[in-house]
């Protein structure tokens, strides 16, 4: 950053590679052991992922991983919609021992997840949560509490907390699949081989993104509005990337699923708009994304391919890198460019990511318990 003090948000992003290695290495047993024990003897058939903000975005990714690795039915829901318009076992198909509620969290103070796990506990449904530190209301109603090693964040937009939380729960699902025998030893070994490169990949991507931004600062800073398009599990990454961008630099940023982009949003694109296209796992959707990218280049010159693609990179306009983590875990890699860009754009606009806006309105709505309630009866 030209010799300046590294912003708090960017410093947190550059802590992620070491945290990834810690989670995949020496802390893995502590982080995943109780979860694996919880589900090992259960006839698990249904998982609910619930949360708000960034942690809700992890649910979009975790849902697909749970269905593939554990062979269960899974869903992700925003806490408010779930409490007011959804519910546990609405179909009546499942017994309590066949269900599991997972609430990823940062503070453990948000009211919605607390109310959800209270309901689950009253029905005899086991609950799991992740938290940044101990002593929150959420923990009281959970059978398994996973304290993430991400530590405190000075910037208000969560970066390392999001990435570590996603990684930890992916590792939990993987270990759960191992103990239940729903993933083969060969696949489990192959995934572990990929995980050995995940931390180094995140480090490389963060550095590459900084260099890319410094080369292309003018075209990146010019648009007042950004779009991010994703597919598969990494639609959740697109949504998280858009949230980070808006939280940090306050410019409107929208996220779209690949096919949904064609039904309305495509017709609003104008010359000069900047669109980021996320390239994750191989398959038909990746080929569709390539086709869309080439068509959109005819409309706006500011199309940026992000991730693992064989698209030509004339002039370095694309941000391309190999993904090392494998399916689902590559979401930890693909979010890094947006965490970095969010901070750098905010810095160029003179915005401090440690300071929020409109706090009075949020306080009036009371979405969270006060911090001291973690030590008081509810």
Image (tube, rainbow, N blue to C red):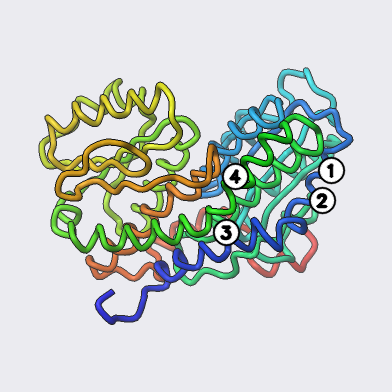
Q: Are marks 4 and 3 in contact (CB under 8 Å)?
A: no
Task: For marks 3 and 2, give the one nearer the viewer.
Answer: 3
Tell me where residue 253 appears, x and y as whole percent.
Answer: 30, 45
Picture quadrant where residue 31 is located: bottom right
Q: Label 2 neighbourhood size at 10 Å, few (<14), some (14-19), many (20+)?
A: some
* Local SS, label 1: helix
Foreground label between 4 and 3: 3
Q: Position of residue 181 (x, y in %)?
A: 79, 31
Which residue carries the number 3 mark? 20
Q: Please give the residue where the numbered disc 2 appears in the rendered image.
A: 34
SS at badge 4: strand
Q: Who comes first in sequence, dot 1 or dot 4?
A: 1
Sequence order check: which comes first, mark 4 or mark 3? 3
Is 377 drawn above or below residue 265 in the view shown?
A: below
- C-alpha distance separating marks 1 and 3: 24 Å
Residues at marks 3 and 2, CA–CA distance in whole angstroms: 20 Å
Q: CA distance from mark 1 to mark 4?
A: 21 Å
Q: Are marks 1 and 4 in contact (CB under 8 Å)?
A: no
Q: Earlier in the sequence, mark 3 or mark 2?
A: 3
Q: Are marks 2 and 1 in contact (CB under 8 Å)?
A: yes
Tell me the residue that label 4 is attached to.
Answer: 51
Query: Mark 4 to mark 3: distance in Å?
Result: 22 Å
Q: Nearer the viewer, mark 1 or mark 4?
A: 1
Of the numbered discs 4 and 2, the one sitting upstream in the chain is 2
Residue at 67% x, 32% y is 69
Label 3 Cα crowd, 10 Å radius (few <14 / some 14-19 / many 20+): many
Secondary element under disc 3, as helix, strand or loop, is helix
Residue placed under numbered mark 1 in the picture:
38
């Amino acid at each position: 950053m030209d010799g300046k003090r590294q912003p708090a948000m960017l410093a947190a992003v550059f802590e992620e590679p070491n945290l990834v290695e810690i989670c995949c290495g020496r802390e893995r047993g502590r982080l995943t052991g109780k979860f694996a024990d919880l589900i090992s003897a259960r006839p698990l058939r249904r998982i609910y992922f619930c949360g708000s903000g960034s942690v809700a975005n992890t649910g979009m990714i975790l849902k697909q991983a749970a269905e593939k690795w554990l062979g269960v039915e899974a869903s992700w829901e925003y806490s408010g919609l779930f409490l007011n318009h959804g519910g546990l076992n609405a179909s009546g198909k499942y017994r309590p021992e066949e269900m599991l509620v997972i609430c990823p969290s940062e503070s453990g103070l948000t009211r919605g997840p607390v109310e959800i796990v209270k309901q689950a506990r009253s029905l005899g449904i086991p609950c799991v949560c992740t938290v940044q530190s101990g002593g929150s209301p959420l923990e009281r109603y959970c059978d398994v509490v996973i304290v993430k090693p991400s530590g405190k964040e000075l910037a208000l937009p969560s970066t390392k907390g999001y990435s570590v939380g996603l990684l930890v729960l992916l590792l939990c699902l993987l270990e759960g699949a191992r103990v239940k025998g729903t993933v083969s030893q060969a696949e489990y070994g192959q995934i572990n081989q990929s995980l050995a490169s995940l931390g180094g990949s995140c480090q490389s991507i963060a550095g590459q993104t900084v260099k890319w931004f410094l080369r292309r600062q003018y075209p990146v800073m010019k648009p007042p509005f950004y779009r991010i398009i994703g597919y598969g599990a990494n639609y959740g990454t697109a949504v998280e990337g858009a949230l980070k961008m808006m939280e940090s630099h306050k410019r409107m940023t929208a996220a779209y699923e690949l096919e949904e982009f064609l039904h309305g949003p495509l017709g609003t694109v104008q010359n000069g708009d900047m669109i980021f296209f996320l390239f994750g796992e191989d398959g038909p959707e990746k080929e569709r994304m390539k086709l869309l990218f080439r068509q959109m280049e005819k409309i706006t010159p500011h199309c940026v391919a992000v991730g693992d693609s064989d698209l030509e990179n004339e002039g370095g306009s694309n941000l391309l890198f190999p993904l090392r983590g494998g399916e689902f875990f590559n979401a930890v890699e693909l979010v890094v460019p947006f965490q970095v860009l969010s901070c750098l754009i905010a810095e160029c606009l003179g915005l401090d990511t440690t300071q929020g806006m409109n706090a009075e309105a949020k306080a009036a709505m009371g979405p969270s318990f006060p911090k001291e309630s973690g030590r008081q009866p509810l």
